[in-house]
Amino acid sequence: MAQTYKIAVLAGDGIGPEITQQALRVLKLVEEKRDVHFDCQHAEFGASAYFSTGKSFPDATKKACDEADAILKGPIGLSHEESEKIPVEERPERGALLPMRRRLNTYANFRPISLPKGMAHFSPLKAEVVGEGIDILLVRELVGGLYFGGKERGETEEGLRYVKETLEYDEQQIRQILIIAFQEAMKRKKVLHNIHKSNVLISSVLWNEVLEEVAVDYPEVNVIHMLVDAAATHLCLNPCQFDVMVMENMFGDILSDQGGGILGSLGLMPSACMGPDKAYYEPSHGSAPDIAGKNLANPYSMIGSVALMLDMSFGMADEAKAVWQAMQSVFEAGFSTGDLSQAGSDITLLSTTEFGDKVMAALQDLL
Ligand code: NAD
């Protein structure tokens, strides 16, 4: 009997449904070609869920996630103006995304910043800087720090509005993400860039203390310390020096978007969010309200998230590799999507669905 995996599919907002549709075509093809069945349960999440149910993370979606072997999540959110129509507590990040991360304890966020040689022309960086391509694994702590700490808003005795947000980590939270990063470094080039801000933040001082303790178990890994502000510069000037990078939540949020920038688009950024029991997979980017509903979005990030899911949740590494190859072969054959189009006049632009069609055709032969 075919192996069955339950997948909760949360298509999300904006471009979410469009790119999820292409990702599901890929899953379907894997199912047809292999002895496996993907039981996809669709559930509402984000702003669309709020407008239809009054909750951005409805109970039915929680149940679908709890029952799933893995979760495939599209981006959520609205434009600034549209977001204002939702009560603060139910806005997609506050009401859905952060509660999901906390509920599933997906503390380890893997964000590959990867541009193979055949796609190197998409980078806005000079060819000599990109060299043979970019291949970085950014490991971001995902359930701690400033985004999850105490929040307070009030008025001072002088009548001034104030806010207080707290950056909190305990040593166990730091240790568990650092262990993941060291393990990944061991699987790759055994070089780990530790990104911090210990010249200013005592959270980084504790982070680095714990790192020294964890490093004892990984003597082969060469640890390179770098302040986060300097890392932002180095990512632009010499991205190829990085292999595995590890950092706390907010630093990772910001630097990984910069990672999308050096590749040429956030549309090339998939991610995996791993916890001890559950994992969910999502593009690193948002819902791109500026291009939503126009069949313009690049589904690479969403299809790439499926590839990560096949590999990391279902042990289907060969199939995942085929999915990457299929997507990359489309770009290497001289096609592009609108977000990457500046690469040259001999490039043919593809819509979201056309890119999906070409990936499916390539994958037919690779699986
Ligand atoms: P964004 O990532 O949605 O878009 C930034 C730029 O990148 C836009 O020009 C957009 O068109 C482009 N872009 C992003 N993904 C693309 C793709 N796949 N193909 C082509 N172009 C793409 O960031 P934003 O505009 O700042 O945020 C929009 C909404 O998304 C906000 O509500 C924000 O809160 C939310 N958001 C959600 C997540 C998430 O669900 N994990 C992450 C980030 C932002």
Image (spheres, rainbow, N blue to C red):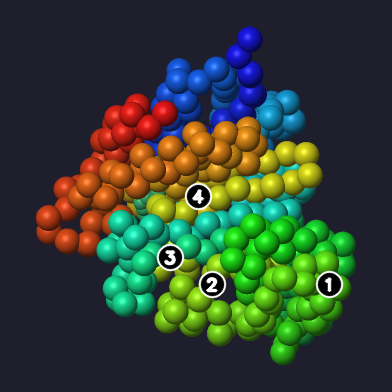
Foreground residue, 118 or 257? 118
Of the two numbered discs 1 and 4 on the same chain, state the one appearing first in sequence: 1
User: Which residue of the protein is positioned furthest toward the top in this rendering?
Assistant: 1
Which element type, helix, strand or loop, lies under badge 2?
A: loop
Which residue matches tag 1? 216
Residue type at mark 1? Val
User: Which residue of the protein is positioned furthest toward the bottom in this rendering?
Assistant: 199
Residue type at mark 4? Pro
Which residue matches tag 2? 242
Mark 1, Cα crowd under 10 Å, few <14 / some 14-19 / many 20+, is: few
Seen in the picture, residue 40 relative to 99 is either above or below; the reply is above
The circle drawn on residue 363 is: none
Labels 1, 2: front one = 1
The residues tagged by marks 3 and 4 sit, at their Cα atoms, a distance apart of 15 Å
The residues tagged by marks 1 and 2 sit, at their Cα atoms, a distance apart of 22 Å
Q: Position of residue 108 (x, y in %)?
A: 70, 54
The residues tagged by marks 4 and 2 sit, at their Cα atoms, a distance apart of 18 Å
Which residue matches tag 3? 134
Check contact, mark 3 vs mark 1: CB within 8 A. Answer: no
Seen in the picture, residue 181 relative to 129 is either above or below; the reply is above
Labels 3, 1: front one = 1
Mark 4, Cα crowd under 10 Å, few <14 / some 14-19 / many 20+, is: many
User: Which residue of the protein is positioned furthest toward the left in this rendering?
Assistant: 346
Labels 1, 4: front one = 1
Examine the image and state in which quarter residue 159 appears: bottom right
Does 54 sit left or right of 207 as displayed?
A: left
- Name the residue: 50% across, 21% down: 34
The residues tagged by marks 3 and 2 sit, at their Cα atoms, a distance apart of 9 Å
- Name the residue: 40% across, 59% down: 115
Which residue matches tag 4? 270
Which quadrant is home to the C terminus?
top left
Which element type, helix, strand or loop, lies under badge 3?
A: strand
